[in-house]
Image (spheres, rainbow, N blue to C red):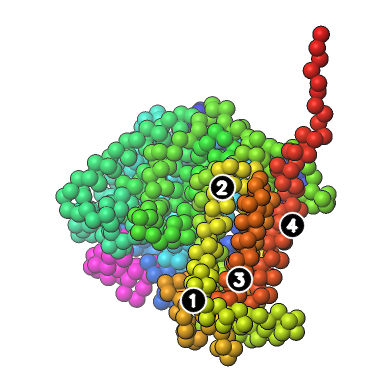
Amino acid sequence: MANADHGGGRPAEGFGATAAGGDRPRLRVARAGLWLIAAVLAARQVAAVLATPRGERLTDLETWVGPNGVLHVNGSLYDSTRFTGTPFGGLVLKPLTRSAEQALGWGWTFGTLLLVVALGLIAARALPPPVSRRTALLAAPVAVSLLMLSLPVRSTLSLGQTSIIPVLFVLLGCFTARGQRTSGLLIGLAAALQPTLLLFTPLLWCTGRRRAALATGITFAAGTGLAWAAMPHDSSRYWVHHLAGAGLGGRADDLANQSLHGALLRLGLNGPLEIALFLTLGAAVAVLALRRAVRYFGDGQLLLAVAITGCAAIVVSPTAWEHQLLWVLLAIVGRAGTRASDRYVWPVAVVLVMTLPARMLLPDMAFLRSLRDNVVLLAALAAATAVPFLSRSSPAYRSPAPPAPAPTAPARFRFVPLLPFLRRVLTRPNLLLELLLLRVTYAAYSQVRLAAGGGSNSAGRAEAEEHGRQIYDLERVLHLDIERWANHTVVGIGWLRDFLDQYYTSFHFMVPLAVLAVLYRRRPGDYRWARSALGFATLLALVGFWLYPLAPPRLMPTLGFIDTVHGVQDFSQPDYGTLTALTNQYAAMPSLHFGWSLWCGVVIAVLATRWWLKALGLLHPLLTLASIVATANHWVLDAAGGAVVIAAGFGITYLLQGPRARTVAAADRERTPTRKPVHG
């Protein structure tokens, strides 16, 4: 494939040409730093595998090398359905049984890591030209790091699977092999290990690589025939009884099976109807994906063509387990979007899908459950059939339309560099990307917030209560200890108690989201400024939760506070309804209830054009302060901490981004003299 002259020669040659000569010191330092990150990630993966008890690590590998492993017995490979490979894979692995048994720890894991590094290096060299010097220098460590972080590689390392090998064989055959026969031999071996990779045969044929296509088919047939001759019973069970692997490794309708077949079964379809629908839809996906792959091959985007075909192989496979989904990550090389604000949507979405569990991408809501259960399948399906990747001839391929910038203005401290990703622009960012990042950020926030308390509400109770006593003593010294008076006063006034309880539970998320939505729609330049300040403030608050777990007044059993929202609690095992296991009740300092409300008040007061809107904005943090204190959910000093992190968030935003875009634009207009028309 790589030898074909499509758009300027071999990708490897294009890479080497752009990388040669004149490395700037800054790029060399960046490259060294990225390789260091890749090494740290690799070391972390090794440590995670080796720290797992012997009986729990490399469990799939132990099915064929353990004391009673399937390759140690004379029966079928598939007496245990944990072995998911083809009969050819079993035939190849059988001689390695004894050596692999001795290498269950370091040897197997390090060997897999070397394969991952080789995969990243080949993918980096296969980027379609033209490749900038910066990309050429940084692509390899970035590719290796992304592979190390990806769920398929992590699953492969922990289970002891061999699914890296077929992907590596395909890339070797497409980008490094000399001659079509060698290329076809490597891809044929990959197909013998993973049959749906036979989809590469029509891709080779339709792109003029017919000798490679024939070599692929012959190699696959020879390997499969050899396995059938050596192990006829196993071959019959795999190809006939298990329908090319269906049902091996687990139930086909399991969430881990991200193929079209698994999705249809999860939707409740079964029997002949499901099989007919799977075959029909699978054929349609394969045809459409191959047509797209041929087009991008002709455009010189060979790696994208390979990725599209691999994604189609995931979709049409009877079972596509997590360790077999690496093709989706390769599709990150496709460029989609003619505007700069849209360019990052696809790569960010791919990275998130391939590195984070689905529960962090979509909330657990009934109407979203089908999407969440099939998120990797949908990504593979989109890459194979739907995403409008740009051709290299498109003007937007290299230079997407930039956003409308505000006039430049330095920060107050000139020695602090302005961050380019926080640059002041007047156009709104991509909504899908904002929603995706908002969801992932909130999921990470929830996880860190819970972990800050030791992973449960009872783990850090003693420390949190000690900190609560410290805060209460400090408030008494400062004469701020009004919580108990306010709490007991409100308890005696029914309507006021109900109002403050409702205000506490309802407005914490509603108002900030409403403010962000209005700014996004009406004031996109100010949206970027406000969103950045809120993000920095929340990050600082997480540090506070981690360093200083604090029991709120309602969880101090000796002080006599009344929990007006949750009722009387068991302090050793508190119950806050469905959120008990998902929230850290000792993450009280600083108070983001008050902090976020103060952020809303500041943003509304600064941006609103009517006095009554400004007044309503400033009233919101005051009512929030009353609700968090009177309901015994926060100390007064918690609110002070919330104010500090919000002020710091706005300060950091100004320091790194400079003045607000609209302020800069107004100042620029004032500096520009208005020209009077000349008559006569």
* Disc number for residue 626: 3
Percent across and percent down for residue 675 are 81, 23
Question: Which dot, 1 or 3, sits closer to the camera?
Answer: 1
Q: Disc 1 versus disc 3: distance between alpha carbons? A: 15 Å
Q: Nearer the viewer, residue 579 or 128?
A: 579
Q: Which residues are magenta?
A: 61-84
Binning the other alpha carbons within 10 Å of mark 3 as few (below 14), some (14 to 19) or many (20 upward) gives many
Q: Disc 4 versus disc 2: distance between alpha carbons? A: 23 Å
* First in residue order: circle 1 vs circle 3: 1
Q: Secondary structure at mark 1?
A: helix
Which residue type does callout 3 highlight? Ala
**Are discs 1 and 3 less than 8 Å apart at CB?**
no
Binning the other alpha carbons within 10 Å of mark 2 as few (below 14), some (14 to 19) or many (20 upward) gives few
Question: Which dot, 4 or 1, sits closer to the camera?
Answer: 1
Q: Residue beneath label 1, please?
A: 494
* First in residue order: circle 4 vs circle 2: 2
Question: Which dot, 4 or 3, sits closer to the camera?
Answer: 3
Question: Which dot, 1 or 2, sits closer to the camera?
Answer: 1
207 sits left or right of 342 in the view = left
Q: Secondary structure at mark 2?
A: helix
Q: Residue beneath label 2, please?
A: 518
Identity of the residue drawn at 58% across and 91% down: 558
Percent across and percent down for residue 325 are 41, 53
Q: Nearer the viewer, residue 348 or 496?
A: 496
Q: Residue beneath label 4, please?
A: 651
